[in-house]
Image (cartoon, rainbow, N blue to C red):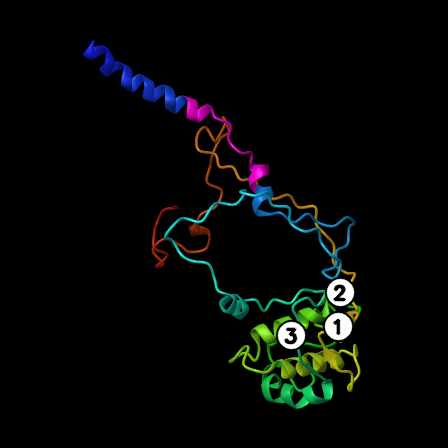
Amino acid sequence: MRKALTIGVPLLALAGFAAAQQAPQPAPADVMATYRPFAAPPGERTRADVPWPAPAIATGALPAPIPGIGRGATSAEIAGWDIAVRGDGHNLPPGGGTAKQGEELFITHCAACHGDFGEGLDRWPALMGGRDSLRSDQPRRTVGSFWQHAPGVFDYIRRAMPYPAPQSLTNDEYYALTAYVLFINEIVGEEDVMDRDSLARVQMPNRDGFVLEARPDTPNAACMMNCRQGRPVGVTMDSRQFAQPGSDSGTSEPQ
């Protein structure tokens, strides 16, 4: 009797493991829908100032927090990181400035790399010019020719510039710099005040130049066995094409 029970326990364990293996697993599409909840708006072309559908995340769809690990962020902590500005101007801060005010700021903080008029020095990028060049055989991607939304210009300048000390200027100064960059691209006037309202209304030349690609997501599946499925496998390239064996390449055989 005891021997039969001893044999039965492993059999029950195996049966339970088999049942767990046969239990329905969430399809990759369900997982992707949970973590990538935004659906693209209809139409071929897309603009960030056109509202996208709100995410539809079912209650309990995301993993629950692990007790004792971490804590909720405070409002002050969130505010310190929450500086992203959308293409429609959402989350632009208070303040304002003109291109006339931004000229001296640009010479002080930006001209060393971008030139006094945004023409670009050495290998640093130009910020102006290139209008109507994107369809040519020599496209020039600048703020004036390529960027889609003016609020994004403010967002990038504040987030990443000046190069040695990003986020070190005031909001008024960042608005003035943004106005100057738009001014040298002949998009706004020298005395036009750029603020959270007017900047969102600026029409960039390439605002309708972006399209949605019909590119599928990578499926969330990995092959763990019988991956060749009868197909031959061979080495098509190795490091010896670029470095001869014995030339400090690290190995004499392909890895």
Q: Residue at x 51, y 37 (%)?
A: 221
| The magenta stretch spans residue 26 | yes
- Classify the position of the N terminus by image quarter: top left
Viewer-nearest residue: 192 or 69: 69
- Mark 2 crowd level (few <14, some 14–19, many ≥20, 10 Å Cα): some
| The magenta stretch spans residue 204 | no
Asked where in the image residue 45 lies, by quadrant, the reply is bottom right
Q: Position of residue 186 (x, y in %)?
A: 79, 79
Q: Residue at x 54, y 81 (%)?
A: 168
Q: Which of marks 2 and 3 precedes in the sequence?
A: 3
Image check: 148 left or right of 159?
Answer: right
Q: Main secondary structure of the magenta part?
A: helix
Up/down of 218 relative to 8, above or below: below
Give, as a three-letter code, the residue at label 2: Leu
Q: Start and end of the magenta stretch?
A: 19-31
Residue to which mark 2 is pinned: 134
Image check: 224 left or right of 139?
Answer: left
Residue to which mark 1 is pinned: 130
Residue at the extreme top = 1
Up/down of 231 relative to 59, above or below: above
Q: Which circle marks residue 93 in the picture?
A: 3
Q: Position of residue 136 (x, y in %)?
A: 77, 64
Q: Residue at x 67, y 69 (%)?
A: 152
**Label 1, label 2: how far apart the Cα atoms are:** 8 Å
Q: Position of residue 174 (x, y in %)?
A: 64, 80
Element at label 2: loop
Give, as a three-letter code, the residue at label 3: Pro
Viewer-nearest residue: 226 or 198: 198
Q: Residue at x 60, y 89 (%)?
A: 108
Element at label 3: loop
Asked where in the image residue 4 lies, by quadrant, the reply is top left
